[in-house]
Each structure stands twice: as C-alpha cells, then as structure tokens.
Amino acid sequence: MLTLMLQPYIPLLLLIAFVIANAILMLGLSHVLSTYRRTPTKIAPYESGMPVLGDARERFSVKFYLVAMLFIVFDIETVFMIPWAVAFNQLTAISGILIIEMFVFILILAVGYIYVWKRGALQWD
C-alpha cells in the first residue's frame, strides 16, 4: 500500500539523488584535480578590475543609499503593472475601471518622480 502511494514520487526522488550525487562528484573532483597556489596577485582584493583606492570600511554618502532605495521603490511599483495587465486582459467587463486605476497609479508614480527630481535626489555630486 505504501509503495503504491510513493510510486509517483520515484522520478522526483531519483532526480534529487542524481543532483546531490552530481554536486558531490563535481566538488570532489575539483578539489582533487585542482592545482591551487596562493600568490600575492590571487589573494589581493579585486574590485571590478580596478586597483583598490581606499579602505573597505569607508563611509558612503547618504545620496548613494537614497538613489538605491528610490530605484527599488520605482522598480517594485512597475512590477505591479504585470499582474494588472493580466487582469486587464482577462476582465473585459470592468476594463474601464482598470484603465482608470492604472492612470491613477502612473500619475502617483509621476508625482513621486517629479518630487524626487525637484528635491535633487537624482543629482550625483
């Protein structure tokens, strides 16, 4: 009885076992076959191909974090347009309400963008 209940899961369990065995095999082979030598060039910090100019614990300007948060906010808000487009395509009976709702949403985004622009948050000094 138990084997009949687990029978549909056998391919999934085999796949998981194969993935785990493959990961262990690749890690083991790379460890055994590697010729790792620590040189001053290899242990030096690497920053986008540029030599390091300062300390890693250097303080950043608040503008950097502000621009990053603004990007995340506007990016997340625009991601909400995708489910709206799906709902708009499927709900033709209330498409007028949905289009007005999207115009209000875009208007709020535009007001926020203009406010941030006027406050100088997008200017980098």
Image (cartoon, grey):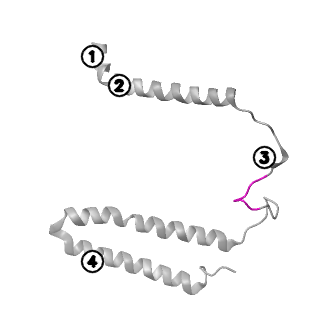
Find residue 64 and name its label.
none
The part of the chain drawn in magenta is 45-50
Which kind of residue does numbered mark 2 sit on?
Answer: Pro
Which sits earlier in the primary sequence, circle 3 or circle 4?
A: 3
Find residue 11 and name its label.
2
Which kind of residue does numbered mark 3 sit on?
Answer: Lys
Q: Quadrant of residue 87?
A: bottom left
Mark 3 to mark 4 CA distance (whole Å): 58 Å
Asked which secondary structure carries label 4, the reply is helix
Relative to residue 51, is residue 22 depicted above or below?
above
Furthest-right residue in this view: 40
Tell me the quadrant of the picture where the N terminus can be found.
top left
20 inside magenta stretch: no
Nearest the camera: 92 or 125? Answer: 125
Residue wearing tag 1: 4
Mark 2 to mark 3 CA distance (whole Å): 43 Å
Which sits earlier in the primary sequence, circle 4 or circle 2?
A: 2
